[in-house]
Amino acid sequence: MTPPRTTRDATPDAAPAPTPGAIAGLTPGFTREEYVSPEVFAHEMRTVFATQWCFVGRAEQLTAAGDRLVADVGDESVLLVRDRAGAVRGWYNVCAHRGARLCETSGPGHGGAITCPYHAWSYSLEGRLVATPVLRDDAFDRDAIGLTPVRVEEWMGSLFVTRSAEAPPLRDALAAMWSRPVDLDRFDLGALRLLRVTVDQPRANWKVLVENYAECLHCPRVHPELVDVVPAYRAGKNWEPGRTDGGVALSPGRLALATRDDAGLPAIPSMRDMDPGVWGTFVYPNMLVDIAPTGVVLTAYVPRGPDHTTVVSYYLFAPEVSTTTHDIEPVVEFSDLVNRQDLAVCERVQRGVASSAFVHGWHTRLEDYARKFVDRYRADVTA
């Protein structure tokens, strides 16, 4: 999907002053090397994904003490655990003894300690070393060794991790973004239920995926079903002219982004006194938020290599929705259809940008959202 603007609607920013070799009305985008180079990919893992707040999952995936969530943040694996006081704690997913990975999969922990599968060294849910089988209790100072923490914070039920001690608090980082994700606070996504998670593995660079999300010039050709439901997208715009709340209206008579409107799903609570519409945004560097009347889709991009990204989609519904009494499939099917259309065209882009004939892309004035992404990325990788 593409993001309706979350800020006050206006015409796109004025084009920058022309530079030698520029084309009037166009702005240069990412270069071939930025899409395909292993060296560039490794650099952005250090300068972007190791320094920013990255979306890793939902707090409700950790419901009880000891529950684990394993996530990749850049080129590192992190482990999130809910402790007995109810707080979510995060560490690098590595044993302090000899470096074995502690957990390979997410799941329930049944309130127990975190035990390394190699030598069975065990850590409390607060990250302290508490047991070293075979070794005597006084063999060494256990208090001097423990798990290495990472920072974890929550926004509307979504968990974010940063590996940087210098990163500002999550809320401050969100408020400073050009995409204004905090404007979506009114939708209270933390009150919704996670009922489905899907995973895709497109052979495309994560930046190709972000740029695709950031514009709707492709929508009339690539998403015929979507533009039938959201008329503004048919004009290649991801905003609705004259509208100041960031939303985009659905077609008359449509009540949902779904393969059929009679699915019987209740609207999410924040939408019940509103005309049907969609809202969304990109949360730099790796999260998409798409809000529709009967369901919300959150997407995480997990870069794996210059031409491979894992795409994880989280489907949220009103708190009273149950998979035993409601049919969520029309919402999931519609989102999956649009997602598959996007991933197919992004894989086509990835194959094209690998050509020696490709120097860099271009952005029109209707792609200013994508241009702002390029600007932010370049600021980070050159800092």
Image (cartoon, rainbow, N blue to C red):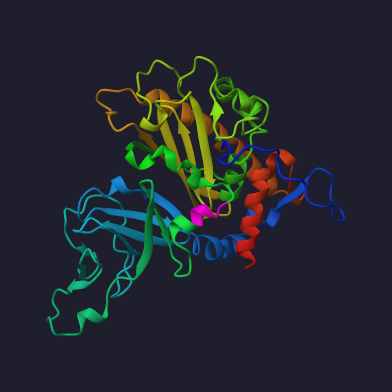
Name the one closer to the observer, 51 or 104. Answer: 51
Could you tell me which quadrant the C terminus lies in? bottom right
Task: Name the residue furthest right.
Answer: 20
**Start-end of magenta stretch:** 173-177
Q: Is residue 83 magenta?
A: no
* Majority SS type along the magenta span: helix
Image position, residue 100 (x, y; %): 31, 68
Q: Where is 175 relative to 292, above or below?
A: below
Could you tell me which quadrant the N terminus lies in? top right
Horizontally, residue 244 falls left or right of residue 123, namely: right
Image position, residue 224 (x, y; %): 60, 23
Q: Which residue shows up at 35% across the image and 42% down it?
A: 190
Q: Which residue shows up at 62% across the image and 57% down it?
A: 377
Q: Does residue 199 appear in the picture of this structure?
A: no
Horizontally, residue 99 falls left or right of residue 41, namely: left
Q: Is residue 176 magenta?
A: yes
Q: Which residue shows up at 49% across the image and 64% down it?
A: 50
Name the one closer to the observer, 83 or 148. Answer: 83
Q: Quadrant of residue 82?
A: bottom left
Name the one closer to the observer, 17 or 11. Answer: 11
Q: Quadrant of residue 34?
A: bottom right
Horizontally, residue 27 falls left or right of residue 64, namely: right
Q: Which residue shows up at 16% across the image and 56% down it?
A: 111
Q: Does residue 290 appear in the picture of this structure?
A: yes
Q: Where is 167 relative to 4, above or below?
A: below
Image position, residue 214 (x, y; %): 61, 41
Name the one closer to the observer, 209 or 242. Answer: 242
Give the mark count. 0
